[in-house]
Amino acid sequence: MPMQLSDPVKVGFDPQRLDRIKPAMRRYVDSGVFSGISTMLARRGEIVHFEQVGHQNRDTQTPLTADTIYRIYSMTKPIICTALMMLHEEGRFQLFHPVAKYLPAFGKVKVLVQGAYGTKEVAPNAPMTIQHLFTHTSGLTYNFLEESPVGKMYLDSGLMSD
C-alpha cells in the first residue's frame, strides 16, 4: 500500500518546487553518481514527498523501493544526536549532566593513565557528561589498535576477539 502523502500547500511547501526533486535525483542516478536515491520531506509530521529513483544494486538492476533496507554505517550518530537533542529541548536532560545519572555503571568507571612504571587505572578527574558523548571527548574508545593497552584489555576481557 503506497504511503499517504499530505497536501504540501497545507504545510507550507510549494508543489512546483517539490516537482523538481525527482528530475534532480534522476540526473544523479543517470550520471552514475548514485545507483539509487530515496527522498522524503515532511513538516510537523506531515509527509509531502516520498520518492525513489534508480536501483538497490547496479549489477542486478533491482529497483529501489519504498521499503529498501540501507546500510547506513556511521549515520546512526547524527540520528541518535538529533533524537537526543529533541529530548533536550523538552527538558528531559541537560548537556552537563553526568552520564552516570542515566547509566549508573558509568559512575564506577576508571581511566587508564600512563605512568613512569607502566599504565594504571585511576578515577577520572571529572565525571563523563552527556556533552562529552556528543563531542566525542568522553574518552571511550574501541579496539582499533590491538597492540595498545586498551586493545589488550578488550581482548583479555572477551569484549573483542582477534
Image: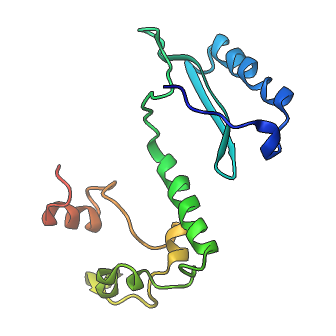
Question: Which color scheme does this rendered protein use?
Answer: rainbow
Tell which of 91 and 142 is nearer to you.
91
Q: Left or right of 72: which side holds 148?
A: left
Residue at (51% x, 27% y) in the render: 66
137 w.r.t. 16: above or below: below
Q: How far from the left and from the top, in percent, is residue 152?
A: 21, 63
In front: 137, or 70? 70
Q: Horizontally, is 17 left or right of 145 in the view? A: right
The image position of residue 54, as x and y in percent, is: 57, 15
* Residue 135 seen in the current view: no
Horizontally, residue 143 falls left or right of residue 152, namely right
**What number of labels is visible?**
0
Say which quarter of the image contains residue 159. Answer: bottom left
At 72% from the left and 15% from the top, the residue drawn is 27
Q: Residue 65, how many percent across, how many down?
A: 49, 22
Q: Residue at x 53, y 53 (%)?
A: 79
Q: In which quadrant of the rendered view does residue 157 lie?
A: bottom left
Residue 112 vs 31, above or below: the answer is below
Q: Is residue 68 visible?
A: yes
Above or below, 127 against 32 in this view is: below
Q: Residue at x 32, y 84 (%)?
A: 104
Is residue 1 positioned above or below 160 on the image?
Answer: above
The percent coordinates of residue 148 (x first, y second) are: 29, 63
